[in-house]
Structure formats: C-alpha cells, structure tokens
Amino acid sequence: MPPISLLRLITALLLVLVLPALAYGASQPVTQGWEYRWGDSPFSQDGIPEWVLQDAPEKWNSIGFPSNPPGRQGRENVWFRVTLPTGEWQEPVLYIFSVDLIVQVWLEGEKIYQYGEFSADGRGRFEGWPWHEIVLPENYEGKPVYFRIFSNYTDIGLWGEVSIMDHPDLVLYILKNSLEAPVIAGFATLIALLAIIFALLQTEKKTFASISLFTLASALMLVSESQASLLIAYKPLMWDYLAAGSYYMLPVAMALLLEQWLTNHRPWVINLIWKVHLVYLVGALLGALAGVFDLSSTFPPFDALFLASLVIIFAVVLRRIRRMLREQQVLLLAFGFFCALLIVDMAVAHGVLPWGRVPVSWGMLLFSLAVVVISLWHYAGTQEALKRLNVSLEEKVAERTAKAEALARREQARVRMLTFENEKNRILGDVITELQDSLGLKQAFGLLARALPDICSPLKGAFYQQGSGDRYDRVAVWGFSRPVPLPVLLDARKGLPEPSKLPELKQWQGAEGGDRNIESATLCFWVNVESASAGNLTEGVLLLEGEGVFGKAESEYGAARLFAALDQAIQRISITLSSIALREELQKFSYEDALTGLKNRRYFDQLFEHESAVAQRNDLPLSLLIVDIDHFKRFNDTHGHEAGDDALKIVAGILQKQFRESDIVCRYGGEEFVVVMPGATSEAARDKANQLCEAVREVPIVHRKQDLGVLTVSVGVASWPNSGEKPFQTLTLADKALYRAKAAGRNRVEVSG
C-alpha cells in the first residue's frame, strides 16, 4: 500500500474514532424513479449504446429498487436508469453497496464507470463484490444515468444501497460502517493465538486447535467481507476468495470441535459433515481458480449445504448437551448465536429478508469472549506446572549463562572485524555499481578517486592515475596533515613501487621534487585495466600508510585479513574498469544484427580474438558452439522468406534464453549462429547444446497466426584446451563438428575431439 494512501487511511480512522459525530457528512439516497429494461443494447458506430441515446419511455418499466426485476426467465443482461437528483456537493460521487455481477455506467452518451470486462456479446466473468464509487461529472443534476449489467448469478442488479455524497464523506462512511469488523477480528485473532499456545502446552487437548481454526477463519471472514478491506488493497476478487475460504471453513472447524467433544459417542454424522464441507471448500476454490466456474456460483450451494449441516449438528448436540462440560455448553451457545446471525445475513443476501446491515461481528465477539473466559480458567490450571518448570529452567539458565559470557567475550573481537568487513563490502558494492553505470573510463576514474577514501578508511593514502607518457599524477589524497609524506607524481621510468605482499612490505624509491624513502609500512596496489587492443595496462597506483594498523600481522583478524580484503577490492575494481574499457572499444563499431537483435559476425570476430587471448593468457577454458538450422532453405522455399525471417527471430530468442549472461550469442550468417562461452568446459558446452536442440524442437514456428510446425538445429561444439589446439582454432574445429552433425542426420550435437 503506498505511504500516502496509508497515511490517509490512518487519518480517516482517527477521525472516526475521535469525532464520531463528524464521521461522515450528509448523503442523498437515490431511491425514486428507477426503471429497468431486460436485454442488452445495440451499439452505434461510435461505440455508444443506442438505449442511452433514445429515451423510448414505452420500453422501460418502473421498479422500486434496481435489483432482480420480474420476469427474468434465465436472462443475464438488464439495464437500469434513474434521473439523478440535485444537491450541493464539492466532490460528488455515486456510492453503490454492491452489484451482481459486472456493470457499466453511462451518462449523456459517455461511459463514466466500468467494473469488469464485457465481451462482444455483453457477457463477462465474476470480478468480485466490491462497493463502487462512481465520480459524477459537473452538471449531472437532473440527467438520467444508465446502468448496463450482466449477471449469471442468482441475483442481478444493484444491491444494498445507492446514494450520492462527497468523496471524503464516503471514505469516512465506509470506515464508520466497517470499523467494528476489523477491531473484533483483531480481538478474535488474539484469541486464536491464545488457543494455539494452549494447544502447544497441552497437546492432549486437541479442542484448542479446533477453536483456533474457527476463530481464525471467522476473523479472516470479517476482515475480508468488511468494506474497509478495499481501502487496504483494492483487490476485490482476492478479498472474495479469502472471504469464501474462511466462510466455507467455519462448519469444518466447528464439526471438528464437536467430533472431539463427542468422541465417546462415535459421532459419524459429525465426522461426515466436516469432511463433506472440506471437500466442498477445496473443490469450490480450486474450480473457481481454474476457471471451471465463477466463485460467485459457489455461494448458493454452500448456503444450502450449511443450513442442512446446522440442522443436523444441532439435532445431534441437543441429544447430548446435558452430558457436556460447562465450558462446552457455553461455547455451543455462543456458536449458536453466531450461526443465527449468519443465517439472518444469508437471508438478506438471498432476498428473503429486506436489505440491512447484519452485525455478524457481534456474534464473533461473543464467541471470542467465551473463549477468553474458558482460556483464563485453563490458564489458572497451568500456573502451578509453570512455576515448577521455571525453577528448573532458572538453574539451567544460570549454568549456561556463565558459559555464554565466556563465549561472548571471545566472539566480540571477531564480530567487530566482521562488522567492519561487511560495511566495507557494502561500500565497495555501491562503488562497483556506480562504476558499471559509468559511460567511460574517464568518468569511472573520477568516481573512483572520490570513493577510495571511504573504501580504504581508516588507512591514510593517495591515488595516482596515469597521465601523459610515463607520468602518474596524484589525483586524490586523504587522512594526512600537511605536508603530505607521499609524492605528487610517480615516474614510471624510474620504476613504480612494487605491489605489496604480506608479510613482507617492500621499499621503493619515489620523489616529490626529489628522491626519498617511503616507510616499509607503506602498502602499494596497482589498478590494472585490460584492453582488447593494448593488453594489460597499469592505469592507477594506490599507496596506503599502514603503520600502526599492521602491527600484528600474525593475528587472524589483523594485517593479513585486512590486506586480503583490500587486495580483493582492488582486483574487483580492476575487473570492472576492464569491462568498461572493453565496452568503450566495442561501442566504436556497430555490432548488432538488424533482423534478430543478436550481435553480428563483425562483433564476433573481434570478441572471439579477445576471448581467445584472455583464455590463453589466464589458462581458462573457452568453448564455442556453431548452430545451424536444419533444412532452412527448404523451409524458405515452402513458406516464403517472410516466414523464414520469423523463424530466425524465434530461434534467436531461444538462443538468448538458453545461455548465461556471460555467454555471447551472435548471428554468424544466414541460418548459422555462433555462441562463445568463456570459462565453460567441454562438458558444460555439450550439455547446453543438447538443451538448445531440445528447446528448439519444442517451440512451434508461428507466422501470421499460422502454425508452420517446428524446426531442428545441428550444433558443432569445440572447447579449449580439450582440443589441444590454440584457442582461436576452436572455430575451425566447431565448424568441422557441425558438418559431422549434419552428415549424421541433423538434429544432433557433435563435439570436437
């Protein structure tokens, strides 16, 4: 829920609680002048219902309230209309308690509201039972408003109440009418939690679990059916599913409770009732979710089943109520009152009784209070056992506390270092993310110079970036008071300081207007950037003063660990800068195939040369796949080149989904594709190739909504160093493997070597 909406809801709740007299302003019920007309209106060429444009009073019939007109006879479409009264409103809205099932609202030939989706024949699916707020335009007074309604439910039309009011007043009106339900539901939830606790403490008494199930289901039903639930999240169908599931669970929970109370009397009827209701609950919800039927259609059969079950339950209970415990009798009376309210609410919902708000929540409140009284009585019985248990626990706690304190002291030092490292990793992660967003190396180095003080803190230091020629200029310095004991520039011709290695920190010669010795506690790190054209270059030098910080090199969380963290951070930064450098070089050319969106052969040629060099230099595996679509010429000749282009796009999409982000997929030419897999072994490449063949076989080629069948591919795989050749020769080996695959019957994978 957005913060602003949550703030408005909280403010409205406070107004309802603090100022009940001002909870909502005046409203104007719309109860006079309603008319109805069975069927559905034809639409004009402009998409406007013709019934809205034509008065035709002889075809409209008067009705007291726009719900369930006479003579339905299985019809599922009806129109209602009414002339809107005048009134003094700032933000006028038309409020409708509910609609069965979906609705469009038209005013002066313009659709001002719709809930649900109407098909071309005027039908639609159940979308939930929310309350409706229809914003009225200016000058609506005295004009007829039309309601187009579809319903395959037992009821059709508007339901409950229809009135005009201001929007702020409507929100407060909804909250005022719904406030008691969530409050009582919260109280019932606390009762359920209390019952769960007792069920855990006294596992031999399963009745607490049944009570918890009943109160939780009731609480969820109250919240889901409350109008205020839509202010929390406007998902009417979700709330209706929750309401249905919790409503259907009530007889299951109560029958389980009665079965446990009457276990000595073998209540097979009660056992059958909860099983039947459980089957209905699962079948109704799963069937509605699967689209077999609408959720709305599951309520009338359940109500009939529920009434029959209540009659049977009370018939069984009345025969044995005198033999029950006092607490059981109290709960049954509370349950009976709750069920009576449910039956009244059911009668209102089905039109047996005139519409009105039934205080079902008060029945739940009575049941919850009964549970509280009984639970307190049970709680008193457990106090003595808890006291004895506390004495035993205190002795064990005292014994273990001494051991824990000793362990805590040993862990404090480690926790401090881990906290420090976690913070540094967080900072480094943020910096890496910002570097990856850089447009080029120049921007990236500027960002790095600003971020290094935070990465290296608490160490003092300086960062040097390669300038013109062999000169490295100092672009950042931190932590020192004047004068800075580190040189302004470094001259590569005189030798850069060697990268530091623990436990030995080497000395070097540098100058700030002359030569001077740098203390052995000075650490040096090189920032190397690998370029596809120029190779590995030292683009930056980081110098850090480690004196005082690295005094205990033998400590597990001392110098060695901190040095390793810094070294790893610089390596990650170097890798990120290398990727930026490569991206800059690649962006100098156009490497995308216009048809498939994959990289083209030009991109592949330069990238493959680079990846081959990197693999050989770092002794890393490199795999290459060449993919060819089988009988593609025959496909083109049969279906045309336009269909062939669609087929290439579909195969290209499958290729992109099958491989890792680090793998590079290119269109090599015609119906051939090539995949470069840096770091992948021959086995991994072969598995990916087999997965690709299977994926292509399973996807049909659809052109202009016509299924043209499926294609297959042949794949040649070559890997270095398995091939025993140079990495760049894997292209030739993969091509030969591809020819073997095609010669062996296509739709297969061949691996070189």
Image (cartoon, rainbow, N blue to C red):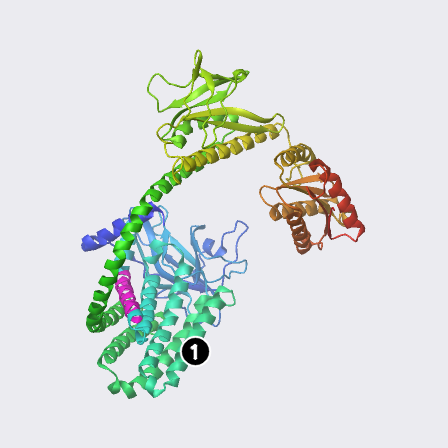
* Residue 97 appears anywhere in the view: yes
- The reply, left or right, for residue 682 in relation to residue 447 is right
Magenta span dominant secondary structure: helix
- The magenta-colored residue range is 180-199
Q: Is residue 730 above or below residue 740?
A: above
Q: Position of residue 107 (x, y in %)?
A: 41, 51
The 10 Å Cα crowd at callout 1, few under 14, some 14 to 19, many 20 or more, is some
Picture coordinates of residue 691, whole percent (x, y): 65, 53
Q: Amino acid at mark 1?
A: Val
Q: Position of residue 687 (x, y in %)?
A: 65, 51
Q: What residue is at 31 percent from the left and 50 percent from the top?
A: 407
Question: Would you identify the image quadrant in which residue 563 lies?
Answer: top left
Q: Nearer the viewer, residue 352 or 43?
A: 352
Image position of 733 with respect to 239: above or below: above
Nearer the observer, 106 or 716? 716
Compared with 323, 514 (above or below) is above
Residue underneath mark 1: 276
The reply, left or right, for residue 663 in relation to residue 409 is right
| Outermost right residue | 743
The reply to whether residue 358 is in sight is no
Vertical order, 702 against 276 (above or below): above
Q: Position of residue 554 (x, y in %)?
A: 40, 37
Q: Secondary structure at mark 1?
A: helix
Q: Find out whether residue 195 is within the magenta segment.
A: yes
